[in-house]
Image (cartoon, grey):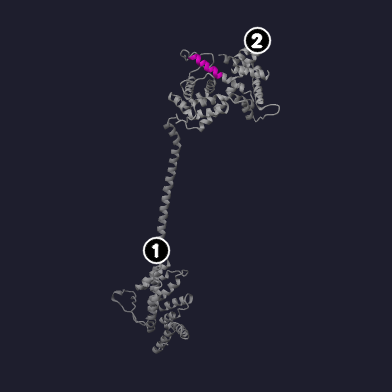
Amino acid sequence: MYNNDRTDDDLLDALRRGGGARERAWEFICKNWRGVWVGTVVNRGGTPEDADEAFQSMYIKFQGAVTDPDFVLHSATLRTYLVQSVLNEWVRQRRPRPSTPGVAEPGPQFPEGQAERADKDIRREELTKAVDALINTLGKRCRRILRMFGEGYGMDEIAEAEGWKDTKKVKKEEKARKKKYECQEKLKKHLQENPGLANHLKDLRND
Amino acid sequence: MIDQALHEKIEDYLLGKLSAQEAAAFEADIRNDPELAEEVELHRLILPVPDRLAELAFREKFARWRAESEPDPATPLRESAGARWWPAVVLLLLLAGAFGLWWHYDTQLTHEREEHRKTKQALEVERLKSQDLEQENRQLREDLQNALQSKSDTKPVKRPTDTVPGGSPPVAVAPQPDPEWVKMAEEPLYAYAEIMLDGVRDRGAGSQALIARADTAITNKKYREASALLARVPPEDSEYSTSLEMLAFVQFKRKQYAEAAKTFEKYYKEYNKKADWSLCLYYLGDYPRHKAEFKALLGTIIATPGRPMHAKAVALKAEMARRGLW
């Protein structure tokens, strides 16, 4: 039923390499394995939309996990690991949560341990919102460069995507690296100028 | 704003890209340098930005890949099939309804057209019948008039059953022997008619069929019917000349000698100038009224020795002279 012409090792290698190889690996996973995670979630009472949302939400965490040099699959296949990750994320997303971070609502009463987890989920969402606010201060080119950096593209690939060429004075990778540096410094400057946002981010990260 | 080298070293440190020794040395620097510590802390805050941007881009790509891949396998088949087929079913029902209406009205229209055609056909048949009857009626009147004219000195025979009290008695025409000039014309005209009718056998549809039917009527001696059929051939028809030729013979057989001569004269003048001998015979049939025309035409034939019918013309003139008719 599914096209399994890519091995786990091949996929893991592509996910770790980043850039175009990583994108093609994710495309393969989405197009060939989606039925498995959607079926797993639907069989437990969820909807296909829930399943897809859980998958997209665990993308960064999963990417970070497999990129870790210590990551080992043991006896599981990459697909099983991914589907389990989607299932965990879906379970996490459907937990009841209080409306304000750090404040457990008087009712309904959460079972032991759940209130803390729900609070953590809220903080994670708040952190995402704060990061999005920071991103909104960037121009299109900075967003593009930092996105490609986040996707694991090399500096030469970023430079090529921007249409930069080597010159006598400076190589294109150096130009991309410098531009990335400038974009990140711009973000830091924005935080220095907005200590409220910086402190909010600090609070959310420290939890 | 710090310099690029320090910026990259902070990032490498935060991303775990420094070796253990380099990391330890850098951590020592951070402890000793509050400004550097603050810089590292600030950099830590912006670290999620590239990941978040990658995640947002991934969501867009995922939507595209999902659209490109197979339909949702987890959606219950019955529900999705129903949802997918429902508009098609409605459309089919609408189409079937529209087709039903069209079929209903089309059938009605076809039926009405057929009725109209049949009525038209029946009317045409009635019209033709009426034409035939009218023609027959006219013919009867002409026959009666001719008979009265030629037998004006003959006393009518009164039949006891025909007597109508207080009214005029009906007129009955007694059969009279043909004049001798008619007998002289009759035989050669029969021979001519045999040849003429041979040419009209086995005709097809339309006027040709009329001619063929008239031929059958003549063979069966139904001259009145033949006359009615031949009268239906229009002058613009290619068979009109044949109909004139046949009609003249039919009129001769019906003892309408004047009409026969007139009809054949028309045929002779308009279609066949070679038929002078036959015209002579028709003139001879109505000799008292066409004496001059007969003599002139026969004289022309006699004046051209060697031409067809010359000998017969000479013999006819001699015979008439012998009988005191010339």
Q: What secondary structure prevails in the magenta region?
A: helix
User: Which of the 4 image quadrants contains residue B88?
Assistant: top left
In the rendered image, residue B312, in percent from the top left (x then y), is placed at: 41, 84
Query: To which quarter of the image does residue A138 belong?
Result: top right
| Gap in angstroms between the C-alphas marked 1 and 2 | 129 Å
Q: Nearer the viewer, residue B208 or A189?
A: A189
x and y percent of residue B82 in the render?
Answer: 43, 34
- Residue B294 point in image, percent of width and height: 45, 83
Q: Is residue A164 above or below residue A109?
A: below
Q: Is residue B137 above or below residue A61?
A: below
Measured along the vertical axis of the image, is residue B120 above or below residue B219? Answer: above
| Residue placed most toward the observer, B194 or B95 | B194
Residue A173 painted magenta: no
Q: Which contiguous range is marked in magenta?
A: A114-126
- In the rendered structure, which amino acid carries the disc numbered 1? Glu
Residue A51 visible, this orientation = yes
Instruction: Name, please, the residue furthest toward the left.
Output: B160
Can you identify the residue that label 1 sits on?
Answer: B126
Give the labeled residue for mark 2: B32
* Labels 1 and 2 touching (C-beta < 8 A): no
**Mark 2 crowdedness (10 Å alpha carbons): few <14, some 14-19, many ≥20:** few
